[in-house]
Image (cartoon, grey):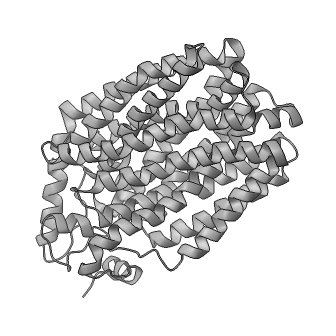
Amino acid sequence: MEKPAKRVEREHSTRVSPGQKDHYKWHLVALLWGISFFNYADRQAIFSVFPLLEQEMGLTPVELGLLGSSFAWVYGLGAPFAGAVVDRVRRKTAILAGLHIWSLICMATALSRNFRHLFFFRAAEGLGETFYFPASMSMISDYHGKATRSRAMGLHQTSVYIGTIGGGFFAGAIGQYYGWRWSFIVFGGLGILLGIVLRKLLIEPKRGAADFADIGAGEQAQVAARLPMREFLKVVWATPTVLILMGAFMCANFVAVVLLSWMPKFLYSKFHMGLAMAGLTATIFIQLASMIGSPIGGWIADTLRRKTPGGRLIVQAIGVFGGAPFVVVCGMTQSVAWLIVSLSAWGLFKGLYDANIFASVYDVIRPEARGTAAGFMNTVGWLAGGGSAPLVIGIIAQRESLGLAIALASLVYVAAGILLLAGIFLFVKRDAARLQALVESEAHADAPSSFPDSSCK
């Protein structure tokens, strides 16, 4: 008799024929790209209108920092719950429902009349958006195996950069000419329309399909039952590579959120740029450079992964160590030209890291737990990293200067690099081999096995 977990999985999946699969797996990346664009455009919009909010509501630097942190706190706190849900429901449903919810909240932000209202809507938007990345990364991983996973996720990652540029520039431009409220109405409304269009185009894959294909298992191979949260935590604790990647993501996300939340105001105040130009300059150079770096990072990582289990981590370490010096220059330079050069170089190295954020984790985490794993990654990255960054930088800026605060963020990048080196030399080879053996064992067993106890070595 078929196990309940397998029956639910089949009911939730829509098959793609073998002839269509290679074609559709790249179409899927393009479809998710559009959703991810609005995921980041909506969250970036508020930072470009900081000066308008400061003038209209008399907000302090710390209050502005809290607006950035409120999103990250709720996004991070909700991520474990979102990841667990994603591993138990259709990921298509989680993605589209999340898109509609966060788009409605984005539009509702226009109703704000004081700091408390803004704080509430920013926090609520974080809850809506927290479902997207666990669901989308899990879905991509079931269409793309080890040979193309970093490239697929690297291409998807470019939506983050374009969304950040679009959110930064258009929110600033709309706010400058029509008022900051229209920025949120426009982005939220377009997100709702996109969700309606994509309802029939997204196809739910079978969980673990790409991993079983990598080892030549047949279509009948099925993932094990969903892991209870307690068992998942045991697995994470017994897989040091995951802990290291979470720590590195916390550090890298801290630095990224410093850029997203404070660079527009830094340019507006220090270089006296207009709102639209500050929003554009703060995003376009680093994000376009990241758009180049991310596909390159994905290609290099897929190539290195064929030679060594630590291939993806090596590319990530190059990204954070290479980017650190340019973070310092961004905060301390007095020249717009050098600022642009540094933002571009920082963005290129950032793209190398970003292409492998989730692909690295999926090299050591089984398919049935990947949504939960991505959720925990987001919890650590956004709650501890992104959640603290706007506030910490705001406090340092109020006491010292915003430029110095940005420069000091480079030390956090160095910490991320040290963690990744530890993973490369000490843990990833063992953890990846362990996962490979478990997947092969499950694929050839008469019935799927559950994840072994954390004491397995």
Q: Position of residue 108 (x, y in %)?
A: 78, 58
Tell me what residue is drawn at x 64 percent, y 52 percent: 42
User: x, y (%) of residue 8?
Assistant: 38, 80
Q: Which quadrant of the view contains residue 266?
A: top right
Q: Nearer the viewer, residue 450 or 312?
A: 312
**Can residue 303 be seen by looking at this rendering?**
yes
Where residue 396 sits, quadrant-wise, is top right
Q: Position of residue 212 (x, y in %)?
A: 19, 68
Specify whether 452 is left or right of 43: left
370 with respect to 65 (left or right): left
- Which residue is depicted at the point 32% across and 50% down? 359
**Which residue is at a point 12% across and 69% down the rendered structure image?**
216
Return the residue nearer the eye: 326 or 219: 326
Image location of residue 414, percent across then percent down: 39, 22
**Quadrant housing the N terminus:** bottom left
In the orientation shown, which residue stands out farthest toward the front? 337
Q: Left or right: where does residue 29 sit relative to residue 167?
A: left
Please name whichever residue, 120 or 27, is drawn nearer the observer in this view of the structure.
27
- Who's the residue at 60% across and 33% down the image? 282
Q: Does the rendering let one see residue 117?
A: no
Image position of 132 with respect to 336: above or below:
below
Number of marks: 0
